[in-house]
Amino acid sequence: MLELDTPHGAARAQLHPADEPRAALVLGHGAGGGIAAPDLVAATEAALAANVSVALVEQPYRVAGRRSPAPAGHLDAAWISVVEQLAADELSGLPLLTGGRSAGARVACRTAATTGAAGVLCLAFPLRPPGRASAPSRLPELDALAVPTLVVQGEGDPFGIPPPSKLRSVVLVPGNHSLRTAKPVTEAVHEWLSRLL
């Protein structure tokens, strides 16, 4: 586990190096969860099987023991700092993919251009808060991406299901926002990485 300084405190990165890596995938966690979430574990397994090294990143608020997420600007700045440090050292020379689950997927979308991501993986992208039909959609964060994107979404996700687009594949798997059924997640991520690389 690496500890990395960011503008908003120490973050951590758990590295899973592939034997002969073709690329690197940096993944962030959801708002109230950590890097042991079932879908992050499934995505890590899929990436390693595709010869892609993985870094699972814990945001500074989680490292400090808080459950409530930091403001979006803090999350984005800390994420950019971690990705830049990893790209300059442990993941140096590898094509970079970023992503995450739920809130972590949003961070990866907002920062993809800055981090130079060649692709973005979104697990359970939170399109709109449940029961708040008047809340603005987060679809513009996905639509702003100019790189290939995979969204893996539970069929019954109360946050909604983003539509596919020219650069965006959307794969529906059994379950809701928690994406606890690992095998379909692993298969979707592995298939996307194989096509992308």
Image (cartoon, grey):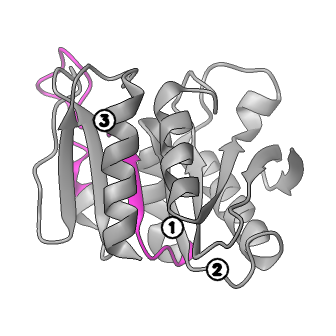
How far apart marks 3 and 2 lie (CA) works out to 27 Å
Work out whether mark 3 precedes mark 2 in sequence or the reverse, and give the earlier one.
2
Work out whether mark 3 precedes mark 1 in sequence or the reverse, and give the earlier one.
1
Give the residue at mark 3. Answer: 184
User: What is the three-letter code of the residue carrying label 3?
Assistant: Pro
How far apart marks 2 and 1 lie (CA) works out to 9 Å
Q: Quadrant of the N terminus?
A: top right
User: What is the three-letter code of the residue carrying label 1?
Assistant: Leu
Segment colored magenta: 115-141
Question: Residue 22 appears at what percent x and percent y?
Answer: 58, 76
Few, some or many residues within 10 Å of mark 3 (<14, 14–19, 20+)? some
Query: Relative to residue 23, is residue 3 depicted above or below?
Result: above
Residue 136 in view here: no
The answer to whether the residues at label 3 and label 2 have Cβ atoms under 8 Å apart is no
Few, some or many residues within 10 Å of mark 2 (<14, 14–19, 20+)? some
Disc number for residue 94: 2
Disc number for residue 97: 1
* Magenta stretch contains residue 172: no
Q: Quadrant of residue 115?
A: bottom right
Picture residue at 70% right of the left edge, 85% below the top:
93
